[in-house]
Image: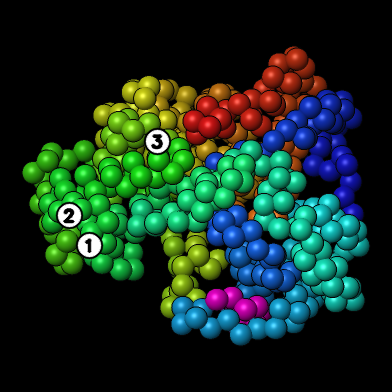
Amino acid sequence: MLDSMRLFPSDPEARAVAARLYEAVRDLPILSPHGHTDPVWFAKDEAFPNPAALFIQPDHYIFRMLYSQGVSLESLGIPQVDGGQQADPREVWRIFAKHYFLFRGTPTRLWLDYSLSTLFGLKERLGPENADAYYETISKALQAPEFRPRALFEKFRIEVLATTDSPLDTLEHHEAIRESGWKGRVIPTFRPDGVVDAEYLGFLENIEKLGAITGESVGTFKGYLNALRKRREFFKEMGATATDHGHLTAMTADLDPSTSESLYQRILSGRSVPEEQQIFQAQMLTEMAGMSVEDGLTMQLHPGSIRNHNRQVYEKFGRDKGADIPSPTEYVRNLRPLLSRYGNDPRLTFILFTLDESTYSRELAPLAGHYPALKLGPPWWFHDSPEGMMRFRELATETAGFYNTVGFNDDTRAFLSIPSRHDVARRIDCGFLGRLVAEHRLDEDEAFEVVHDLTVNLVKKAYKL
């Protein structure tokens, strides 16, 4: 099922160089500094219940494709807001197998084939005729100790795995991991959207909880900022090295204190209009950059996604159910207030992501190729495909080089896809470098240095790992 030369260039010379480079990094440890796996898996280390719960129900890449072809989310057992999740896991798997052909040509197919083959020894293409046999094989394997979450973590050679967590989270599962004596490094990431975005469900209640947790008076902007500082410090104590911000736009602002206070009071009133909410988020990005200068947490910005586009799905199944859609994003003007204040400060590491590929060469690479604080995150979400990764390298490298990027992060909720995603990224980077060597644009010894940096060193540096 898996060809050892997959994803390498078709040109024989570039292909041979890519293969040599890949051998040098294939077995290096995985650094996963941004993802969405559930820390409870590693805290409790319980067996995954069944193949559907492992492969299908956590992975919106899978169920959004099935949904697009008329398969209901109810039939796949996707958890509902009211707590409903009534679906026979074996039947869910049969539905998945019946529609496996939908993933032809997609990165999801690469990840799935890799996991099925390398972990479970399943070499035939999945389909209706072997669905039950696949289910039985995987189910049996999941009961073995070597398929528990911690054992898989070690099997995958994961050196560090970051989760993404609400600022109100107790981080009790991270604490349980630390107290267990297990050596696996699972760290939180501070994601403050729920107390920054006024459109977030339960926003005002979240602000009250923030005040209660920290003992700060969040009725003033100063108290609110102090509460956020305290939560960031708590996350740092629990191992966090980064923050993450998921805004619709990359707009930033640099308001004076009195204007910020007035705006905050308007937000707290519950009567603010969208324009005020957007300016507030813009100001908070700049405030967060200042806090990162203070406490050293790497700052990540993931803009440009219109979240929960399908209102019907959102109301029944909640957030993150495959209905987030990319939107054009502008960076040059929007980031200028923040960069004017902090972009030249070497204490800040600010990693930019995009869903708008048209900005790679026009905006992002020139920005990162100038401001010391800026780095480019890897292709994200809809673009973490072989083609998307190659487009990123081709469009960004000419202006930003390799060393204003931060390697690869998998950004996944599907635990088993982590090694396959990193394998794809390593192969694409090796292919890109192999082509540069074959075209006499890079010496091969330099290519070996670069591929090690892209795989390990740049990630460790950017995320302070």
Which numbered disc, 2 or 3, marks the residue that appears first in the sequence? 2
Q: Residue at x 56, y 24 (%)?
A: 403
**Which element carries disc 2, helix, strand or loop?**
loop
Disc 1 residue type (three-letter)? Glu
What secondary structure characterizes most of the magenta part? loop
Foreground residue, 201 or 384? 201
| Residue at image mark 2 | 218
Q: CA distance from mark 3 to mark 1?
A: 25 Å
Disc 2 residue type (three-letter)? Val
Would you say 364 lies left or right of 384 here?
A: left
Span highlighted in magenta in the image: 70-79
Would you say 461 lies left or right of 137 here?
A: left
Where residue 246 appears, x then y in whole percent?
Answer: 41, 52
Q: CA distance from mark 2 to mark 1?
A: 7 Å
Which numbered disc, 3 or 1, marks the residue that appears first in the sequence? 1
**Which element carries disc 3, helix, strand or loop?**
loop
| Residue at image mark 1 | 208
Sort mark 1 into few (<14), some (14-19) or many (20+) by Cα contacts within 10 Å: some
Sort mark 3 into few (<14), some (14-19) or many (20+) by Cα contacts within 10 Å: many
Sort mark 2 into few (<14), some (14-19) or many (20+) by Cα contacts within 10 Å: many
Foreground residue, 39 or 84? 39
| Residue at image mark 3 | 297
Q: Looking at the image, is 52 positioned above or below residue 265? A: below
Q: Looking at the image, is 314 positioned above or below residue 454? A: below
